[in-house]
Image (cartoon, rainbow, N blue to C red):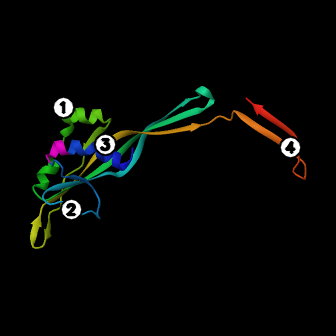
Amino acid sequence: MTRAELFEKLRPIIELITGYDGAVIPADPNAPAPSGAYCSVEPMQSVRTIGQIVVDANGQNRDVDTEVRSQKVATVSINFYRGDAQSAANTLDRCNFRPDVSMALFRENIGWLGMGPVQNLNSLVSGNVESRAQTTVQISYQHVQQSTVNAIESVGLEVQNEDGETIYEYDIIS
């Protein structure tokens, strides 16, 4: 799962919890900030693998299809700006126990492992205090890698002399 795919799965869930409809954006330091209160999300602040890797190989039709599935734990960094940033960040605490949130996570095959502390990042901007808060959420998901190794079904063999004239030709077909 890519960073963009994970963000698109998390966006509606974060909007549902915080009430920031249309104001949840991907974290991008080069993008302009929207007006009003908003939330930026970095879905893959850090990623690690847990548990065992599952490898399934299917050798039908002489090709070998392999699927490698691993369990990933990602730290999602969520930053809130303006408005009541502290309260908005705190709404994420234990939200996975809400039935609507639990079902949304289940539909997307995402596990909610817990939330870190809410950091108060209020700062002075142009002589005014701007409300800011930051928290992290641990989520789990399955990462799948697929590959196909094609079987060699025939090989052509050609023997030539020094002048490039064909002396012998043979096809090996399995």
Q: Residue at the spot x=28%, y=33% of the render?
A: 106
- The residue nearer to you, when weighing 102 against 38, is 38
Secondary structure, mark 3, is strand
First in sequence, mark 3 or 2: give its number: 2
First in sequence, mark 3 or 1: give its number: 1
Secondary structure, mark 2, is loop
Q: Residue at the spot x=38%, y=47% of the render?
A: 2
Disc 4: CA contacts within 10 A as few (<14), some (14-19) or many (>=20): few
**Disc 4 + disc 2, Cβ < 8 Å:** no
User: Which image quadrant: the N terminus?
Assistant: top left
Q: Residue at the spot x=31%, y=42% of the render?
A: 139
Name the residue type under label 4: Val
Secondary structure, mark 4, is strand
User: Which image quadrant: the C terminus?
Assistant: top right
Residue 173 image offset from top left, x and y in percent? 75, 30
Real-space CA distance between mark 2 and mark 1, rounded to the nearest whole angstrom: 32 Å
First in sequence, mark 2 or 1: give its number: 2
Please give the residue where the numbered disc 4 appears in the rendered image: 159
First in sequence, mark 4 or 2: give its number: 2
- Magenta stretch: helix, strand or loop mostly: helix
First in sequence, mark 3 or 4: give its number: 3
* Magenta region, residue range: 15-19
Q: Is residue 57 left or right of residue 82?
A: right
Please give the residue where the numbered disc 2 appears in the rendered image: 33
Q: Say whether residue 92 is visible.
A: no
Name the residue type under label 3: Ile
Is 151 located above or below residue 86 in the figure? Answer: above
Task: Mark 4 vs mark 2: give the one in front.
Answer: 4
